[in-house]
Image (cartoon, grey):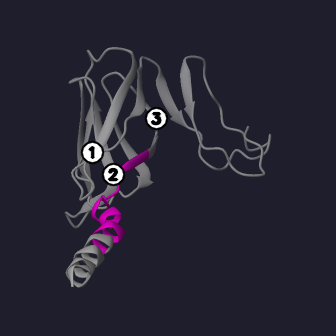
Amino acid sequence: MQLMKTIPHFLCFVFFLLCFPFAWGQLPSARFDSVYPPSAQQGSEVEIKVTGQDLEGVQWLKFSHDALKAEPKKGEDGEISPNEFIVKVAPNAPLGIHKGWIGGGKFGASNYRSFVVGDLSQVEAGAGGVSQEKAFALELGQVALGKALAGKFAW
């Protein structure tokens, strides 16, 4: 008789143990993988694009120094462009590497990515410089920004 009373309690306990790991499930955190362009000149304004995982609804980009301000980029229709920001770098922003975080979506704040502030002008390399004949001119004192293309040379 005593055994018949303990079996339901034992089964409830086993059920609880089997279901308990699922109760610890958590939402993923936003993962910030890259920012392009990864740098800006002092006193300039640049449009940047961030990439990563679980970035749905990202609303802000913050930096480790107050001289760098970011606001979401808006399209012609006034809607916010997903994962795109306009970064304004103050003329007195310190040179060097600064940390940047994104967040405001349903998965919270992300890990940080580095963003460089320099004093040299920047030139976008573009996708056309895949041969020596199509190479673009780079002057002394400029920084070239570009992306590596799989299986192609960059000039």
Residue at the spot 25% in from the left edge and 76% down from the top edge: 12
Q: In x, y percent, where is residue 131?
A: 79, 45
Badge 1 element: loop
Query: In the image, residue 41 lies at what x, y percent?
Result: 39, 25
Sequence-first disc among 1 and 3: 3
Cβ atoms at labels 2 and 1 below 8 Å apart: yes
Q: Where on the picture, by quarter, is residue 24?
A: bottom left
Residue of label 1: 109
Q: Is residue 119 rendered to the left or right of residue 105?
A: right
Q: Amino acid at mark 2?
A: Ser
**Residue beneath disc 3:** 38
- How far apart, in angstroms, are the residues tagged by discs 3 and 2? 22 Å
Q: CA distance from mark 2 to mark 1?
A: 7 Å
> Which dot, 3 or 2, sits closer to the camera?
2
**Picture quarter with the N terminus:** bottom left
Q: Residues within 10 Å of mark 3 (few under 14, many from 20)?
A: some
The residue labelled by disc 2 is: 29
